[in-house]
Image (cartoon, coloured by chain):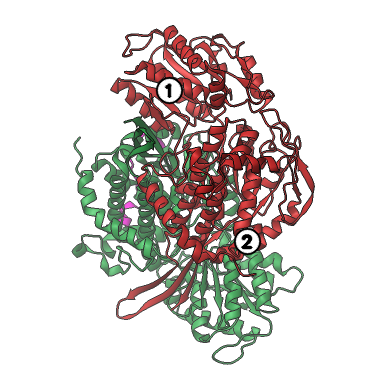
Chain colours: A red, B green
């Protein structure tokens, strides 16, 4: 079959975008080719608008999700929306012993295509996903529990940006070495030595992407596209509660690959039925696949326990993990007390704190802090922050649009348990979702703890994923920074926040983050939040503390997904 | 104390060289700033000539090698030259629990200095080592057993090139991300969001370089300089039989660091006494240090067994290993039979085959090969190759200048054992070194095996380090390529050679190397040998088969030795 899209056509179409992405990862200025406004999508833009996206999603419900890939043996399914509806979608059940050899067989042509054609194919996949942003938004919303706007933005354009960023890094890494070189070494009076050299980036093998429940696309795309762009075949194993967004992704990828004349089996799905993955949702077939001798790359986002297991056991593979950490905000002083409170309140509420980047521990000097509204005692700061959260969530309709739904009963359990840890300066409330009565919606709880108390650290040094935060009283800012260092070193951190007007305190916080290797946001009081990072500019995670062994994205994230083979000949 | 050399001075001095190195790793053309001709060194060039180098080395013999580093507790030593002389040098015995904290304390200023100053300091260290090339040559010769010219070239300029190459990769990797960025995100009708971002490359911690016996500088410098240039402190643990070349290196590095105003403890030595390292020479204190929680990077060259142990056990560190493989040459046909024989004979003899890149298995079709001198049977090819070796080594003085000395009794034992594996088409002879009567000198042995024999693979698929090769009869070239694939996949390979005039056979060999990820040299018949690679142009190892998990040098070799910390502030 002749390819419907040739590689040169795709290169011509996407090269300007790739070049812009390459420029931006060098400048780290703001850029995105993927609009985040919902109204930027619709028929007039050649894409699905909100209603068409919803219709496309509705058409999937209760149906058989078909993917024509080898080794299909029966069906699996069982996703239930955190908004209380059954998705009722079933997926092909894959036999890896049939599927993986087919994926390996697909690779040689993909290797020959070279880095530029691979990048162009990846960008075409992302462009088609982008055109269906509102359909993906529904799928992300009804698997993660994110509110619609967030699912549409973080699960759509922001995820697409992160995928494209990985493609850009992968491309530039592969073309650092030229395709060919003529090497001539002088030999004094004798003739020089001449060699013709050819350098080919070759993939590691089959890459496994293990998806997570909360950000199936945002956390899944970087590894998927980094591996695919470097010539690997990619096996996508979604979280059993969040299969649909990645199943849609796999189907689009296979469609583009086939149209471009490549073997669709370069991307394939292994879906897992509800309950098959064990309590953690990801330890059944994921374990088996991660140890498969043909699987040479594993990308994983999820619990520390399984991430650590992968790092220790998947010895035949390069393993990239984003696990869990304990995120800290050091509050020393501020010249915008209201802005600080509003900013922190939003960070704590967004998606019910179910982000790996949400602050958990707010370290506040026991003696209070200096602000533009005068000295504020520890009790005042905590009460004012609780007030800011209450104000933000005062209207139920607005509240659910920020909070979304609780992703699973374990999170709900932690909210209940939090009340037993200490005095709650902010109590969690259950809200009824006006549109989805079956949704579990909880407002955040904030518990006051004193770092000087004997067992307080046992509580606040454990990751408590969900809408639970601790307002920890500390002796001083330098005490807070010591605790920050200990937290990053022992527990890891995806993010650190700091508020201070004092250059000495700022330097203390910065030095701690530089030494312990954590990403720091200082004095955020406006529309940027500590839990949000922008692709092409911000690093997500550092790869240098226990929360993650990789950062999104940098050279290290892509450089070891391929190797370079040199063939030299006497010239 | 004011620095004797400022960072700006060093940058001014070395920036042109760094730029040339950066250009060359992009073009991969020939370049070296380090002359390899012995006469290029001497007083008129501002360096030590051969006699001065010898005098400097002689002055070290039987003496106390002083390094003024913290935590010194007594002395160790015991190196014995493979040429039969006792070196009698003793080194400080280090207490890592004192030394490592001092190394960590040295790092903050090194981080602040930034990538360009670090690169310049590294290049100054290399330049000073280069000026003492003949002194290092003596030290390498009398620890590795290499012949003088090889010790001078491979242990001198070629090792310095590999060190500089690592510095170039480290530099470019760190400056891919700008130091600062202004990020402005449009917000429709509202004011844009502004953030000031600062990006700092931060080191992983203390890096451990575990040296090998045969190429202490060539295999030691890439890791040492890659780690130092990326901001880490480097603890150098030489092989107990080859401490002197790395002890000299550490002393030069400390001298330059101190003169440039940095803490000399950024580079330190942990020497180990003879016999303390266990039978493998590297498993005593190396094991202990490799598991030290402050050690975050390990570079190792040596046995597969200990390399595998490091990869599995040193979980707190990034581990870069070059282990052992089984190198194959596929002989299908040639249009320069004499050139092929001469080239292969030299490859087998050089340093008595004690290179990780020396061919071990020569796969030759049972039915013979086509050559410019007509068809040659398997027996003719093996006999002619044996003859070429005999001719090359016909004169004892010339022979020892190629062979050098046998590095240790285990190699000598393997030479003896080889005769029991099958018919020796080439028998090993013991030679007396005209200058060093105590040297152990052995010519290579080549044993004929048939791949169809039941137990032949048990022999030739084991690495037999030293001057032992197997002429393996195979059914056909495609049989040879199947065996090549199996060998790379199961045992790993640092190098693969091929001789063919048939495009179809060439493609088979190339495809095998691309799929199994091994570096291939085709039809070498002149002055380039399969066991030699040139820095800035050739990759040493692929990092994609079991022989090594890294290649010298590429982005992956440096990208994970540091992390990037971002500090963002509301603008």
Q: Position of residue B347 (x, y in %)?
A: 50, 73
- Residue that mark 1 sits on: A343
Residue A224 located left or right of residue A92: left
In which quadrant of the rendered image does the C terminus of chain B lie? top left
Depth check, front residue: B139 or A166: A166
Q: What's the chain of the residue with tag 2? A: A
Query: In the image, what residue occupies the spot 58% across and 61% down?
Result: B325
Tell me if A87 is positioned left or right of B105 in this view. Answer: right
Which callout, 1 or 2, points at the residue further toward the start of the chain? 2
The stretch drawn in magenta includes residue A290: no
- Residue B324, labelled with which disc? none
Q: Quadrant of the N terminus of chain B?
A: top left
| Mark 1: few/some/many CA within 10 Å (<14, 14-19, 20+) | many
Q: What residue appears at the point 67 percent right and 52 percent down from the top-left corner?
A: A268
Q: Residue furthest right?
A: A74
- The secondary structure type at the circle numbered 2 is helix
Query: Is B67 on the left-hand or right-hand side of B241?
Result: left
Indicate whether A16 appears above or below A40.
below
Magenta segment boundaries in residue numbering? B54-74
**Nearer the observer, B349 or A122:** A122
Label 1–label 2 contact, CB within 8 A: no
What number is the disc on residue A258? 2
The residue lying toward the viewer, choosing from B15 and B172, is: B172
> How packed is label 2: few (under 14 Cα within 10 Å), some, or many (20 or more)?
some
Element class at badge 1 = helix
Q: Is residue A567 above or below residue A285?
A: below
Rendered image quadrant of residue A429: top right
Residue A438 percent across, percent down from the top left = 69, 24
Residue drawn at (40%, 67%), measured in percent from left and top?
Answer: B150
Q: Nearer the viewer, residue A216 or B89?
A: A216
């Amino acid at each position: 079959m002749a390819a419907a899209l040739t590689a040169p056509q795709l290169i011509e179409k996407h090269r300007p975008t790739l070049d812009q992405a390459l420029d931006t990862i060098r400048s780290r200025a703001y850029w995105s080719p993927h609009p985040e406004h919902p109204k930027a999508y619709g028929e007039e833009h050649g894409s699905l608008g909100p209603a068409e996206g919803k219709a496309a999603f509705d058409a999937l419900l209760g149906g058989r999700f078909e993917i024509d890939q080898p080794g299909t043996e029966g069906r699996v399914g069982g996703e239930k929306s955190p908004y209380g509806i059954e998705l009722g979608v079933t997926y092909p059940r894959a036999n890896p012993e049939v599927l993986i050899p087919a994926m390996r067989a697909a690779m040689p042509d993909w290797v020959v295509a070279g880095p530029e054609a691979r990048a162009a194919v990846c960008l075409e996949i992302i462009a088609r996903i982008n055109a269906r942003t509102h359909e993906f938004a529904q799928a992300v919303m009804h698997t993660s529990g994110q509110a619609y706007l967030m699912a549409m933005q973080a699960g759509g354009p922001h995820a697409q940006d992160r995928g494209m960023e990985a493609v850009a890094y992968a491309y530039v890494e592969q073309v650092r070495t030229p395709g060919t070189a003529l090497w001539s070494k002088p030999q004094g009076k004798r003739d020089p030595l001449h060699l013709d050299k050819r350098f080919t980036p070759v993939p590691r093998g089959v890459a496994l992407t293990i998806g997570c429940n909360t950000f199936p696309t945002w956390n899944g795309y970087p590894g998927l596209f980094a591996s695919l762009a470097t010539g690997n075949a990619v096996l996508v194993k979604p979280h059993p509660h969040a299969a649909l967004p990645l199943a849609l992704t796999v189907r689009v990828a296979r469609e583009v690959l086939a149209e471009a004349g490549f073997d669709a089996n370069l991307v394939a799905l292994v879906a897992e039925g509800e309950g098959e993955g064990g309590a953690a949702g990801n330890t059944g077939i994921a374990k088996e696949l991660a140890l498969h001798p043909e699987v040479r790359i594993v990308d994983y986002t999820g619990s520390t326990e399984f991430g650590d297991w992968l790092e220790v056991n998947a010895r035949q593979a390069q393993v990239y993990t984003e696990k869990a950490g304990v995120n800290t905000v050091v509050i020393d002083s501020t010249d915008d007390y209201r802005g600080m409170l509003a900013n922190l309140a939003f960070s704590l509420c967004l998606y019910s704190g179910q982000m790996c980047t949400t602050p958990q521990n707010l370290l506040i000097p026991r003696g209070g802090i200096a602000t533009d509204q005068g000295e504020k005692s520890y009790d005042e700061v905590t009460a004012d922050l609780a007030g800011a959260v209450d104000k933000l969530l005062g209207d139920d309709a607005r509240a659910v649009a920020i909070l979304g739904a609780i992703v699973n009963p374990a999170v709900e359990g932690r909210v209940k348990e939090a009340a037993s840890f200490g005095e709650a300066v902010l109590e969690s409330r259950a809200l009824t979702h006006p549109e989805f009565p079956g949704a579990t919606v909880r407002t955040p709880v904030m518990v006051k703890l004193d770092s000087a108390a004997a067992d307080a650290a046992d509580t606040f040094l454990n990751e408590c994923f969900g809408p639970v935060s601790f307002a920890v009283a500390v002796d001083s800012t330098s005490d807070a920074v010591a605790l920050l260092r200990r937290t990053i070193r022992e527990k890891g951190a995806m993010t650190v926040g700091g508020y201070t007007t004092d250059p000495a305190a700022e330097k203390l916080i910065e030095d701690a983050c530089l030494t312990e290797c954590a990403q720091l946001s200082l004095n955020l009081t406006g529309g940027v939040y500590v839990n949000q990072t922008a692709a092409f500019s911000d690093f997500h995670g550092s790869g240098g503390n226990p929360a993650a062994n990789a950062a999104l994205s940098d050279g290290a994230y892509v450089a070891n997904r391929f190797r370079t083979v040199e063939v030299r000949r006497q010239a």
